Amino acid sequence: MEKIGGTSISDVAAVENVLVAGRKGSALYNRIFVISAYSGMTDRLLEQKKTGADGVYTLFARAGSRSAWVEAIAETHQEMRSINAEIFRGTSQKLVADDFVSERIKGVRSCLLDLERLCSYGHFRREEHLNTVREILAAQGEAHSAHNTALLLRGLGVEAIFVDMTGWREEAEMSLDARIERALSVIDLGKQLPIVTGYSICPGGMVRVYGRGYTEVTFARIAALTGAREAIIHKEFHLSTADPKIVGINRVHVVGRTNYEVADQLSNLQLEAIHSVVSKELRRANIPLRVKNTFDPQNGGTLITRDYVSDSPQAEIIAGLRGVHALEFFEPEMVGVANYDAAILKTLKRQDVRVFMKASNANTIMHYLAATPEAIALVVKALQGDFPTANIATRKVGIVSAIGSALNSQGITAIAAQALADACIEVLGVHQLMSNVDIIFIIDELYFDDAVRALHGTLIEHSPLRLAAQRSPRVARAAPPIPSST
C-alpha cells in the first residue's frame, strides 16, 4: 500500500521510477497507490496553506465580486492544462487529460454559479453550503493527479485503473469503508494497478473532519481494510534526525527505525511527516509504515513499527514548533480546588485554539497554544471576563523536543539542558513524562534554530551512546525490506 505526496507526484521521472522501477509482468501489481494533488494545486482550489492567501474557495466564501472567484477557477483550470502539457507533451494522451479536467472544472464552475443564484433568494444562505463547496473544490486536485498518473502508466504498458473516490456526480451516500470496498471489489490486484484519488467523499466531509491531511487518511484506511503487508509514503524528503535546513544536510542522517509513539510526537509538533490518523490506523492494524524519499529510491528510508525500541538509550530526532503562545493563568484561589481548569479548557475549545501541552502547580496553570495572535487575544479577553481576579499573561515561545523510542538514560535530560546552557540559550521550562519518549524544552522563539543545532550536536552527532550504537552491527541497521502483498 503506497502513497505519493504532492511535490513527488509533480516529478514525472521520479514517479515513473517509484511506480515501475524496472518491474515487469506480475511484479508491477499487487500494489495500491493513493495519489495526492500536484504541489500547490489544493492551495489554488482552497487557500494557501501557510499564508492563507486566497484560493477559489476563499474568494467564493467571501461573497464579494463574482468575477474574482470565476477568474481564480479559470486560472486553476489553465494551470491544470499546463501540467498536462508538461507531462504528456507531444502525445495524444494530453487531449484525454485536458478533456477530463475541463469536464470537472466546468462542472464545478456551473455548480457554484447555480448555488450563487440560488442564494440570491432570501431563503437560501451561502454559509450553509460552504463546507460542501470546500469539499467539491478540494476533490478536483486529487482527481486531476490520479487520472493523469493512471493515464501515464497505461502509456507505459501498465494495466493501471483510475479509482475515483471523489463521488463525482454520484447520488448515493456511503461510508468511507463502504466506498473503498466497493471500488476495490471490481479490481484484480494481481493483474491491475489501482491509482486511487487521495480525496474520498464521506459523511461529514473529508476536509472538514481531517483537514488538509485527508489523503493520508484515505491511504491508511485502505491499508487497514486490505490488510497490507507494508504501507509506504513517498515524500520529497527523508525523515531525518533534524531539519537539514536548520542543522545542515551533511550533519543529519536518515532515521532508520522508530516506532509509532515517536511518530505521534512528530504529529503533535505539526510536522508534515505523518498524519495522526495514519499512526492510529496502522498501529491498530499492526501494519509497518515506511517513509521514503521519492528522489532517493535506493535508500530504505524510515521503517516505523508498533513494537520497535532502540537497543540503547538515545535521541532519534530533534524537532520543534515555532510560534507557540504560552498562556500563564495565575489564581491563588485555585489551591485545593479540583478540576479548576475545566472552565479554561472550555474557553480554549470555544475559541478553537489547539492545546499543545499544559503544566500546573498549586496556583498557576500554563497552557501552550498553537493559534493566531488574534485567537489568543480573544481567549485572554474571555478568560479575564470569567476569572476577574486571575492574572493572565502570554508570551510567544518556541518548543524544541528531543524524541526517541528509548530516552530512559538517567543523564540525558541533564546533558540536553547543559547543551542549551553551553549555547547561551535560557530554558524557560522543561516537560518530560515517564513514558521516556520525548523531552521538551521551552525557549525564547528567537533562539529556536540555535536550540535545534545545539541539541542535535550533543544528543545525536556527538552522543557517546549513539556513536557506540553506530559501531554495533546489531543496532545500527538499515530499515529491512518487508515483502508487500498490497
Image: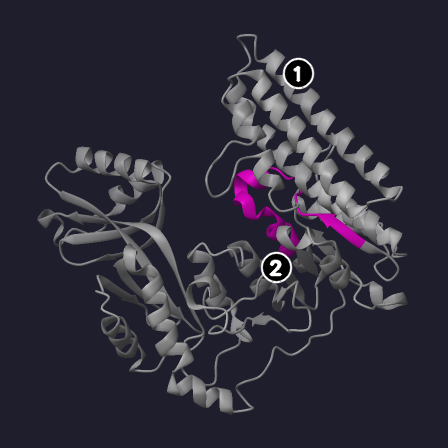
Using the image as rendered, state which of residue 429 and residue 259 is in the foreground. 429
What secondary structure is marked by label 1? helix
Q: Which residue is mark 2?
A: 235
Question: Which corner quadrant holds the C terminus?
Answer: bottom right
Viewed as shown, does residue 255 lie left or right of 166? left
Task: Indicate the position of residue 121 as horizontal and vertical percent values.
Answer: 56, 8
Amino acid on which the number 1 mark rests in the picture:
Asp
Residue 204: image quadrant is: top right
What secondary structure is marked by label 2? strand
- Disc nearest the viewer among 1 and 2: 2
Q: Residue at x 51, y 17 (%)?
A: 64
Task: Indicate the position of residue 177 as horizontal and vertical percent values.
Answer: 68, 48
**Badge 2 local density, few (<14 within 10 Å), some, or many (20+)?**
many
Using the image as rendered, state which of residue 160 and residue 286 is in the foreground. 160
Q: Which mark is residue 114?
A: 1
First of labels 1, 2 by sequence position? 1
**Colour scheme:** one colour
Kindly tell me whether residue 58 is visible in this rendering.
yes
Viewed as shown, does residue 474 lie left or right of 413? right
Viewed as shown, does residue 432 lie left or right of 67? left
Task: Indicate the position of residue 472 as horizontal and vertical percent values.
Answer: 51, 91
Residues marked 1 and 2 touching at CB (< 8 Å)? no
State the residue lying farthest toward the top.
121
Using the image as rendered, state which of residue 366 and residue 463 is in the foreground. 463
Number of numbered discs overlaid on the protein picture: 2
Is residue 208 highlighted in magenta? yes
Separation of disc 1 and disc 2 at Cα? 39 Å
The span picked out in magenta is 194-221
